[in-house]
Image (cartoon, rainbow, N blue to C red):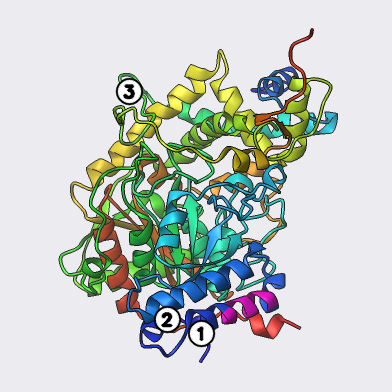
Amino acid sequence: MDLTAKPAHELRALLDRGELSSEELTRAYLERIDRLDRGINAYITVTADLALEMARKADVRIRRGEAGPLTGIPLGLKDLLVTRGVRTTCASRILENYVPPYDGTAVRRLREAGAVFLGKLNMDEFAMGSSNETSAFGPVRNPWDPDRVPGGSSGGSAAAVASGLAAAALGSDTGGSIRQPAAFCGVVGLKPTYGRVSRYGLVAFASSLDQIGPLARDVEDAAWLFAAVAGHDPLDSTSVDEPVPDPRACLVPEARGLRVGVPREYFTEGLDPQVEALVRRAIRVLEEQGAEIREVCLPHTEYAVATYYLIAPAEASSNLARYDGVKYGLRVEGGDLIDTYRKTRAQGFGAEVKRRIMLGTYALSAGYYDAYYLRALRVRRLIAQDFRAAFETVDVIACPTTPTAAFRLGEKIHDPLQMYLNDIFTIPANLAGLPGISVPCGFTDQGLPVGLQLLAAPFAESVLLRAAYAYEQAAALPPRRPPLERRSP
Amino acid sequence: MRITRDEVLHVAGLARLEFEPDEIEAFTGQLAAILDYVAKLEELDLEGVEPMAHVHEAVNAFREDEVRRSLPREEVLAAAPDAEEGCFRVPKVIEA
């Protein structure tokens, strides 16, 4: 029995029946990480001692009959989630040795739930990238093909879950950073509604867009992990006080009466024919389950990437002003204080982060603010209004997560604009604050996974999860694992 | 070109960044290409459309002004590049 191939809800049953201890399970994961992660590079930091200590505590709790859904389950955390006593690098040289004195709220909730932390997962530097190639700790490899990217920015999270190096993981999504790598690696990735999960202790990239969410083996695991971290938090004034859906009520394999909108703007040139065929087949599966398929119109879709690449860098340029070499992180001494700031930031940030700080600073600077930033905020409203109108007639929207399957390492990294255009189908949900999920819907002829993306109205995660679960159960794709063991020496 | 080398240097100063000369050339070209692309937004008639800075358009979230425990000073300073006598230590800013 390979424990590392099982979804968390199956492990839950084994743990609760006493057929398996969390310590055994955690050792199995640590052994696999030790053996296979050299070829994947999913982890920046493995916290073996902490994991075993958490596992032993979880075992006590399980024996007492006090286990919750995640007690004793080994998880990975994207390395921008602040963890007390465990270095949190954001995959950046500027935070390479930063050991935070506190836990972020999502992390604290998982600790209280009795989850086990295997370590901190690789990502694009400060979550800025779509391929994991901007990490200061080296790129992550796609477990299905080591010459391809795992997607980004939560590439380490997606690759770890796909290759059995974590039972599930937390990531974050600013323009697709959970859903796109989930699609590229063949796992489920959920971006909650903006405001669902507290951002306290999530290192900020673009504060009006960032959300924490789960990457998991299946929809059921994603639902439990989502429910564990969601909910209002007084430490994040943008977190919203709405009741969190009960996963049991969402995990019903029933699509009858579900109104599914298919936006024609997401099936245009640039969409790979194999991806299109698999996504259309997935939509037919929903239809066969009794869902009603309707065409919807999202006319401002083509402006989403341009809007995002003004708003996100503008917010980032402000957020990243805090890295000044004074309170934490790297300091490179210069001739005076200003020179110290400049040298610290020039040496601490990588090229993509600098590019976005520059773009954002430019878009906010005197003389350009109205032409760029303010214009982008106006278009953002048009994009949000498109969705509001669509959700008056449908319950969920179904479309591809990405225009293509995973691309090759090095293919887009030298052409920032081509890299940005890869996010075309995921960005609109962030601009409008909607929940979205990517669910595996098959493989291309090259053996690369493809994701079906479902979107719902704000705070309608219960509808979203029900649609995703109904699809997953009806499609019943045969289980497939990446060919890792064959490659390892 | 939508952005010149001099503007790139000006923005780098505002952002407290510095670049090697060859990096400046590369950045100028890349930023110009991105700005050309985002100019697509100029196609739209935005007359009467209000800017949307935030999806929930939240009003202020108020709370009682209560004293709460903050992070332990020693642990916060332990993460600082330089600290002395309970304070962050920085290069001299004011000349005597």
Q: Secondary structure at mark 1?
A: helix
Instruction: Residue A392: say if magenta.
Output: no
Give the image location of residue A340, x and y in percent.
Answer: 77, 26
Q: Residue at x 67, y 30 (%)?
A: B88
Give the image location of residue A154, x and y in percent.
Answer: 55, 56
Find residue A233 and report its image quarter.
Answer: top left
> What stretch of residues is rendered in magenta?
A27-34
Q: Is residue A458 left or right of residue A20?
A: left
Q: Are marks 1 and 2 in contact (CB under 8 Å)?
A: yes
Q: Residue at x 36, y 83 (%)?
A: A16
Residue position for label 1: A3
Give the image location of residue A470, x and y in percent.
Answer: 27, 72
Q: Chain of mark 2?
A: A
Instruction: Residue A31: say if magenta.
Output: yes
Q: Is residue A123 left or right of residue B67?
A: right
Q: In the rendered image of this protein, does residue A167 appear above or below residue A80? A: below
Q: Are marks 2 and 3 on the same chain?
A: no
